[in-house]
Amino acid sequence: MSRASPPEGLEIRFDYTFPVTELTERAVVSRVPGLIDERLKVLSRRDPLTVRPGTSLQTCLDLIRETGMADSVFVTDESGRLLGVLTERDIFAHLVGPDAELGQPVEALMVDHPFTLHLDEPIRHAVELMQTGRYRNVPLIDDDTVLVGVVRPVDVLKYLAEAFPEELLNLPPRPHQRMAATEGA
């Protein structure tokens, strides 16, 4: 197979460089502290999976399984105020074995008065809670202490990534980074 030559006087060039904005990796890192000092209300948050007191543990497990997105159930009163939280971790730590009593009410295992954050607190506080390893789902409340949402680590990461779309996509590889295999087909 022969290749055709370009017309006389026309030069073909292939540019294999990718545009990189003026914002360097160091500049990105310097902007992150300001972003995590923004208020929690700027994050997209998830609707909490809620139940009323007296709900059986089996029903809570079924709800967690049905949604596929949650790993916690928040117990609220009729006005939406948070009374407690029940996580999969709580359930599996206390109920192991074939004789587990899943008919118990949620109050038997829920954590009473869990730590919450207000929508006006900085994202930094949620990150600090998540870093302790005790919270994967941080309950958010409003001025009336009504549960208004849940923030997860993925929500914070999504917020940070959205703040730097081009910068993150265009960062060059680090010199010390070695790939085990070439990418592509």
Image: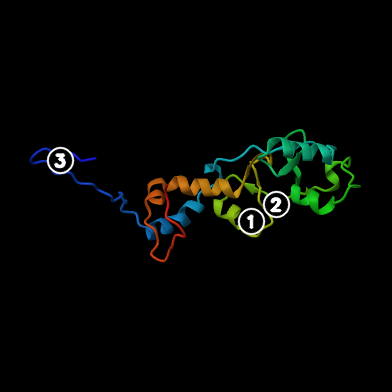
Residue 131 at what x, y percent from top left? 62, 59
User: Is label 3 in a helix, a strand or a loop?
Assistant: loop
Identify the image quadrant of the N terminus: top left
Q: Residues within 10 Å of mark 2 (few under 14, many from 20)?
A: few
Question: How far separated are the C-alphas under marks 2 and 3?
Answer: 71 Å
Q: Residue furthest right?
A: 99
Locate residue 113 relative to residue 159 in the image: left or right.
Answer: right
Q: Nearer the viewer, residue 10 or 118?
A: 10
Q: Residues within 10 Å of mark 3 (few under 14, many from 20)?
A: few
Image disc number at residue 115: 2
> In the image, is 24 to the left or to the right of 133?
left
The disc labelled 3 sits on which kind of residue? Ser
- Kind of residue at badge 2: Phe
Tell me the tag on residue 129.
Answer: 1
Above/below status of 124 relative to 119: below
Q: Amino acid at mark 1?
A: Leu
Residue at 79 percent of width and 51 percent of height: 92
Disc 2 versus disc 3: nearer the observer:
3
Q: Upstream in the sequence, badge 2 or badge 3? A: 3
From this viewpoint, which residue is outermost toward the bottom? 176
In three-dimensional space, the C-alpha distance between marks 1 and 3, rounded to whole angstroms, equals 64 Å
Which sits in the foreground, 95 or 161? Answer: 95
